[in-house]
Image (cartoon, coloured by chain):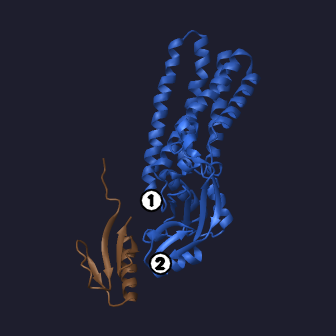
Amino acid sequence: MTKDILAILCGVVMGTVARSWMMRRDFRQYPSYPHAVVTHLALGFIAATLGAVAVPAIAAKEYTAVTFLALAATQFRDVRSMERQMLESLDQSTLVSRGPDFIEGIARTFEARNYLVVFVSLMTSLFTFLYSPLPGILAGTIAIAFVRRFMRGYLVRNIVKVRPAKLHFEGPNLFVEDIHIMNLALREIHEIYEKLGRAVILEPWDDNGREIIANVGQRQAIAHDVALLLGVHRDVDTAEFTPLLRRKLDTGRVGMVIVPIEPDIECFVEAVKNVPVLESAYVNPLVSRAGRCAAD
Amino acid sequence: MEITIAKVLLAAVTTTTDHRIAGLPVFYAETEDEMAKMATILSRILEAVAHDMENGVYIIVKH
């Protein structure tokens, strides 16, 4: 087997393995359709091939072959819009929607993962080409570990403290401690909330957390994930039981209320803590002087 | 671009005839219980939420 073929082969295998491994990690976000898995594995394979052929092509002084990488970029942008369109259309038939911010985040992740596959296969094929398959596979494994370390985003637990809270009614108004959630007229709805409803308070650790949790898309993502994990006591004709997160204007604390099918409060807290912080919601006012000054 | 109405007042249910409610369907009830029942039925049919204006008027709002 020639050196070129060996480098390409190792790169393709490592890149495809990396893509399938990345797919396992985001199972919760993933629409979990077997056919979608096949689609993404195939795209991962294409990405891996593109990354793997780059090094032998350059070595053979076929510099124009590198323009294939530009083709890859166009291809993967299509992946993003494909995911976005699919999730947007599916979102209309879920009881608690993901919201456009969450969908954009997922779509962006799918696009980015293909670039990461290119990176992994490029590293593998480079080291295989320069040395032998073993250092190549080692380099690929290190590249996967690097990707894992640096592409890990924040979770809600990193930006806010989540604790159980009591919900109560003042007249028709539903409160979580001192945070007003909504106005509900019907007595029977009050009784269901008082009996089955669960609430938590999200207290930001700092000003960054306060601004992230203020993002409506982030709050919708939390509502979606919790409803998905604990179940939600609602159907299309009982809009009263839509899980809601509302903000206390004075402090930036957020109260969340849901009527879950599984009423375990510890699981509820854990579910909220493990929601990813959306890229579109992530802000960092504390790096600026004005932000730090205002935080005093 | 698709333009949709996000929130809309669909109906009002009341026990009082003192208020002048205009611009949307108004359902008059004899008692508080009847008002609650009408509001429940309306909110289920319209897939909307009944809110209490705290003056004897419930409004049915589509969110």
Residue in the image at 59% along x and 21% along y: A53
**Closest to the observer, A289 or A217:** A289
Residue in the image at 47% along x and 81% along y: A187
Direction from residue A62 to residue A122 in the image, left or right: right
**Closest to the observer, B36 or A98:** B36
Q: What element carries label 1?
A: loop
Identify the residue position indicated by label 1 in the image.
A93
The vertical placement of A8 against A76, above or below, is above
On the question of residue A2 being in view, the answer is: no
Callout 1–callout 2 Cβ contact below 8 Å: no
The vertical placement of A63 against A100, above or below, is above
Disc 2 marks a residue whose amino acid type is Gly
Residue B23: name its quadrant. Answer: bottom left
**Closest to the observer, A114 or B48:** B48
Label 2 resides on the chain identified as A
Specify whether disc 1 shares its chain with disc 2: yes
Image coords of residue B33 (percent x, y): 40, 88
Identify the residue position indicated by label 2 in the image.
A171
Chain in blue in the render: A
**Closest to the observer, B26 or A41:** B26
Label 1 resides on the chain identified as A
The vertical placement of A29 against A287, above or below, is below
**Drawing shade for chain B:** brown
- For the C terminus of chain B, the quadrant is bottom left
The vertical placement of A294 against A73, above or below, is below
Give the crowd class for mark 1: few <14, some 14-19, many >=20 residues within 10 Å. Answer: few
On the question of residue A211 being in view, the answer is: yes
